[in-house]
């Protein structure tokens, strides 16, 4: 009997400690929803959005994989991880986060989040359009950034690589409607 393959989602987002922020609360819900949909979630393993998605998924009995990095911080990740992978470099960390991932979700973050998004875009744009994972950027603030990139940098044939969504509810509707991330 063939074993079922694990579906992986990766969440990129800031490491801020404000557990009362809209993004943190929303990311808890995203983690819970992804667990319900059968995803294991990879993330950077530290605080902020990474902690929120880990807590959300493990509260539902799902798997949260934190990929920590000696260049960034301590080897130990947040308290809600079910597995921790420790890397030496950011490049190794991003490779693990991107490899074999079916769905990418991006919350508000800083330079680290942007570097994760841009490297992911560059890697997945080379994959077959049939099996290419989708990137969902959560929050209307992304519209100005993405529209500028589409207008000035990213060719039209690659505009389908990502979608800006207003909030968690829109993400939930899209994934529930299609049954998958594409």
Image (cartoon, rainbow, N blue to C red):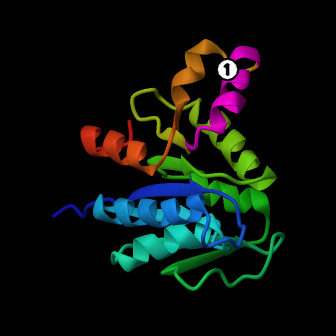
Left or right: residue 71 versus residue 132 is right
Q: Residue 42 at what x, y percent from top left?
A: 53, 63
Q: Residue 27 at what x, y percent from top left?
A: 51, 61
Please say whether residue 174 is one of the residues in the magenta stretch.
no
- Identified at 73% across, 23% down, the residue is 148
Callout count: 1
Q: Quick check: can you spot residue 16?
A: yes
- Identified at 33% across, 78% down, the residue is 61
Q: What segment carries the magenta color?
A: 138-152
Image quadrant in which you'd find residue 155? top right
Left or right: residue 58 versus residue 126 is left
- Identified at 46% across, 55% down, the residue is 9
- Identified at 52% across, 65% down, the residue is 25
> Which of the image's four quarters has the C terminus?
top left
Q: Quick check: can you spot residue 6?
A: no
> Which of the image's four quarters has the N terminus?
bottom left
Left or right: residue 87 versus residue 5 is right
Please say whether residue 150 is one of the residues in the magenta stretch.
yes
Say above or below: 73 vs 4: below
Say above or below: 18 vs 138: below
Q: Residue 125 at what x, y percent from top left?
A: 58, 30
**Which residue is label 1 attached to?**
150
Q: Residue 99 at what x, y percent from top left?
A: 55, 52
Mark 1 surroundings within 10 Å by alpha-carbon count, few (fewer than 14), some (14 through 19), many (20 or more): some
| Secondary element type, mark 1 | helix
Left or right: residue 127 versus residue 173 is right
**What secondary structure prevails in the magenta region?**
helix
Image quadrant in which you'd find residue 12? bottom right
């Amino acid at each position: 009997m063939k074993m079922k393959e694990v579906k992986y989602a990766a969440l990129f987002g800031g490491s801020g400690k404000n557990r009362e922020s809209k993004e943190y609360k929303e990311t808890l819900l995203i983690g819970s929803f992804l667990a319900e949909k059968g995803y294991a979630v990879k993330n950077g393993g530290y605080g902020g959005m990474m902690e929120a998605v880990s807590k959300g998924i493990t509260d539902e009995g799902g798997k949260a994989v934190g990929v920590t990095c000696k260049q960034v911080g301590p080897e130990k990740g947040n308290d809600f991880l079910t597995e921790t992978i420790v890397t030496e470099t950011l490049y190794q960390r991003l490779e693990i986060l991107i490899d074999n991932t079916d769905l990418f979700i991006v919350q508000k973050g800083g330079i680290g989040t942007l570097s994760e998004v841009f490297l992911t875009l560059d890697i997945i744009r080379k994959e077959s359009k049939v099996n290419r994972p989708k990137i969902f950027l959560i929050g209307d603030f992304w519209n100005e950034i993405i529209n500028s990139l589409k207008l000035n940098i990213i060719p039209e044939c690659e505009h389908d690589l990502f979608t800006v969504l207003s909030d968690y509810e829109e993400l939930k509707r899209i994934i529930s409607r299609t049954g998958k991330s594409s």
